[in-house]
Amino acid sequence: MRRFARSTALGLVLAASTLVACVKVPVTGRRQANLIPDALMRQLGASTYQSTLADEQVAKGTENAKVINSVGKKIAKSADQPKFDWQFKLLQASDTINAWCLPGGKIAVYTGLLPVVESEAGLAFVMGHEVGHATAHHGAERLSQQLAVLGGMGALYLYLDNKTEMSPEQIAIISAAAGAGAEVGYVLPFSRLHEKEADVIGMMYMAKAGYPPKEAPLVWDRMEAATGGGNVSILSTHPTNKDRKKNLNEWMPQATKRYKRNKDKVKGDSTTKLWSASQF
């Protein structure tokens, strides 16, 4: 039975390795490996989006909701992903400073974030960031990483069970400790990379849509002020605001060139302040 389990585990690992798709991330060109087909991730994103929105208060027909949808569509056009069914929703929660994205282009923004972005240009960066998560297939990559960690943990358990005299309780303790180490040392640092990558992609998308990229690091300045600081703990999935702004400024020359070629797409001053905390 143990020999069969070992063979089965090895077979699963080999089968998974043949399904890995190596692709390049937009803008940054980083190569990533995904085990999950894009069509499956889009279905997962759509179903999760609907179930999540059912528990939220979605703003419908308001001016702010219209701005969210309008800016989102402009950024999505820059992304050029015809297979994605883009959706952009505004959620009524003034105490929540957040936005999120699900695979396939399902994006939501909370009203609490609007005073932080302040303007249409600031919103364009946030929308670009979330769109960047979708087009870079970060969700599929994260899930693939977790599957790889689980596969490795299974192999470790089988090895300890077959090659040592440890009790089941001892094996469980070691496996749990190794799992925690893998989570901290592998999965979480990659999440921080995803955040910085989405920042860069988002800034490029906003520039292509006609919004000034110089607004991107300013959004993080306001975010830092609104949240009371930019430091993160070792278990955070987000980089510090300092690191994010440094990363954005390194890519700023390229984004500025792209903006100059497309700035006529947006009429008027997109940096005019539209939202403040007193409105919510």
Image: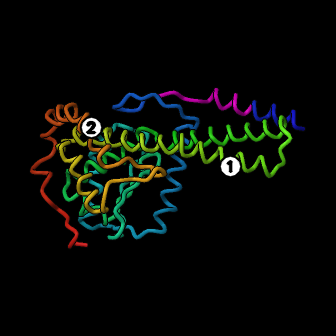
- Residue topped by disc 1: 176
Q: Amino acid at mark 2?
A: Met
Q: Tell me what residue is drawn at x 37 percent, y 39 percent.
A: 197
Residue at (65% x, 44% y) in the render: 178
Q: CA distance from mark 1 to mark 2?
A: 41 Å
Q: Is residue 58 above or below residue 101?
A: below
Q: Is residue 12 magenta?
A: yes
Q: Nearer the viewer, residue 18 or 232?
A: 232
Quarter holding residue 251: top left
Instruction: Give the image location of residue 152, x and y in percent.
Output: 67, 37
Q: Position of residue 9 (x, y in %)?
A: 76, 35
Q: Which residues are magenta?
A: 11-23
Question: Residue at the spot x=68%, y=49% of the render?
Answer: 176
**In front of the other: 97 or 74:** 97
Q: Nearer the viewer, residue 154 or 121?
A: 154
Quarter of the image with the N terminus is top right
10 Å crowding of disc 1: few (<14), some (14-19), many (20+): some
Check if residue 166 falls in the magenta segment.
no
User: Taking 256 as reference, is 159 left or right?
Assistant: right
From this view, report whether residue 106 is shown above or below residue 210: below
Mark 2 Cα-neighbour bin, 10 Å: few <14, some 14–19, many ≥20: many
Task: Residue lying at the far left in this picture: please name it.
Answer: 268
Which amino acid is tagged 1? Ala
Q: In the structure shown, which secondary structural element does the residue marked by tag 1 occupy?
A: helix
Q: Is residue 47 left or right of residue 247?
A: right
| Quarter of the rendering occupied by the C terminus | bottom left
The residue wearing badge 2 is: 204
The spot of residue 107 in percent (x, y) is 39, 53
